[in-house]
Image (cartoon, grey):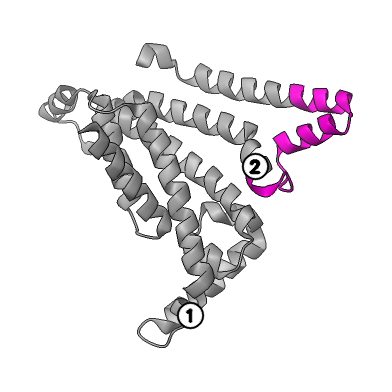
Amino acid sequence: MVADGLAAGFVAAAAGYMGVPLIGTAVIGAAAVLASQDRLNIAAVLFVAVIGCEIGGLGGFRIGYRWGRQLLEHPGPGLAWRKKAVAKGEAVYQKWGRLAVFVTPSIVSGALEMKFRQFAIWNFLAATAFVLAVGPIFFSLAKIDRTLLEAARDMGATPFQIFREIIAPLSLPGVAIGMIFIFVAVMGEFATAVVVYGGKASTTGTVILTYYVTGNYPFAAVNAFMLMVAMMMGVIIILRLVDIRKEL
């Protein structure tokens, strides 16, 4: 059961980042719900989903790089729409650069011939942010006692009132945990840039590493301290807004 659930999560995450709509979110959410029932381990679910998204994204990129233009510009139904989608994708990449990976399918990145190593880094960041946002929120939502919802309906509460008074407050721990995971992961991410892209992609971590390697220890120390303070302040602000221990 556990192996099958994790395998399904991996395949769905890969398919979602390869271009199949909605399936990744649905299955990752379902796996998080099973984890809330102690039928799966939430850490294993998140880890497998991130790896699946990364592999699926790389596969989608390769498909787009090799056949993307041919598929998108091939004569047939929807040709005008497909050409318009390509034009919009190009505009997004021109405006946002590498950040466009967060909002465009991997096939589009390949079709627009983004550098593979650069895509691998930003796809990993996007996958991490996606999984760490979806997983904890679904996990938290699944923990809500359904008797509370039924009692609210019996008392005549509207769906909006139920969401505002019950679902939103009780799901805040999952939102806060996801925010902390994403914030810390993105702020401290540099290992992927070093391993995959040889350190040529500029992140906060690689800047600190460059200062350290070149013997500029004061600047390395200052930047590392500022990064640590920024991370601590971000986490403290989130914890001030939501008392995770109390809510859970």
Where residue 91 appears, x then y in whole percent?
Answer: 61, 68
Q: Which residue is mark 1?
A: 70
Where residue 50 appears, x then y in whole percent?
Answer: 44, 41
Residue 172 quadrant:
top left
Amino acid type of the residue that numbered disc 2 sits on in the rendered structure: Val
Q: Which residue is mark 2?
A: 195
The answer to whether any part of residue 90 appears in the image is yes
Viewer-nearest of discs 2 and 1? 2
Where residue 36 appears, x then y in whole percent?
Answer: 27, 26
Residue extending farthest to the top is 246
Q: Is residue 234 above or below residue 1?
A: above
* Quadrant holding the C terminus: top left
The residue at the point 49 percent across, 68 percent down is: 64
Secondary element at image label 2: helix
| Part of the protein shown in magenta | 196-225
* Mark found first going from the N terminus, 2 or 1: 1
Residue 95 quadrant:
bottom right
